[in-house]
Each structure stands twice: as C-alpha cells, then as structure tokens.
Amino acid sequence: MNKQGIVDAVHALLQGTKVQAESVVDTVIESIVKSLKKGNEVSIAGLGIFSVKARAARMARNPRTGESVKVAATKVPKFRAAKALKDAVK
C-alpha cells in the first residue's frame, strides 16, 4: 500500500471527495514531520512511536578508492512498532 491507497481508504470511510481525503492524509503526515523537526516524539496508539535519533560524526571509507571520508553528524527519523502492531503482523 502507498499514500494513494491510504487516501482511497480514507475516502471510502468518510464518503467525502478524494481531494478532502488526500487533504486529511497530507495533514496527518505534515503534522508528524513538523513534530519530528522540532525534536518531539509522535506516539500513535496501536501503531508505534516516531522519534528522531542523532547520529554522531564518523569516518567512513570510500569502497572504490579506499580513501577515508568524514561523514558529518546528522539526525535521522526512527520508528518503534507498538506491541499491537507486532502482534497483528505475526
């Protein structure tokens, strides 16, 4: 399933227009992204927790040349699945 599949599911449930359903899905995604940009966690019961993890700067090696390359510190999104989601997938 992709974003369009989620929009279709929301559209079928709400019985509005597809534009309204897409707006709802976009708003949810934008809210999660904005919260993560601020460094906050987003917890959705039954689904999981979205958070931001800091990666430290490190030295890596270019596999083609063997040269050492410095990789800058960065922040990456992280997702921890809830127990209900893990049990549902089993």
Image: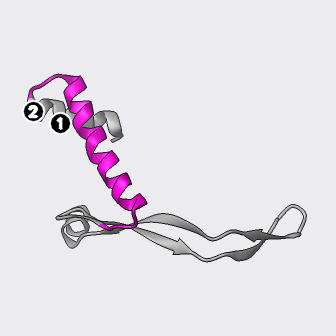
Q: Tell me where the magenta segment starts and ends, as one range.
A: 15-41
Pick out the residue farthest to the front. 38
Q: Give the residue at x 32% y 68%.
A: 41
Name the residue type under label 1.
Answer: Val
- Residue 26 on image: x %, y %: 30, 39
When the figure is inspected, residue 41 is found, relative to residue 13, above or below; the finding is: below
Q: Is residue 17 magenta?
A: yes
Residue 24 vs residue 46, the one in the foreground = 24
- Residue 21 on image: x %, y %: 21, 31
Q: Report which quarter residue 57 is drawn in.
A: bottom right
Q: Secondary structure at mark 1?
A: helix
Q: Give the residue at x 12% y 25%.
A: 16
Q: Which residue position is annotated with label 2?
A: 14
Residue 45 relative to residue 72: left or right = left
Question: Distance from label 1 to label 2 (Cα)?
Answer: 6 Å
When the figure is inspected, residue 34 is found, relative to residue 62, above or below; the finding is: above
Residue 30 relative to residue 52: left or right = left
When the figure is inspected, residue 4 is found, relative to residue 78, above or below; the finding is: above
Q: Which residue position is annotated with label 1?
A: 10
Residue 44 vs residue 66, the one in the foreground = 44
Q: Mark 1 and 2 residues: CB-CB less than 8 Å, in contact?
A: yes
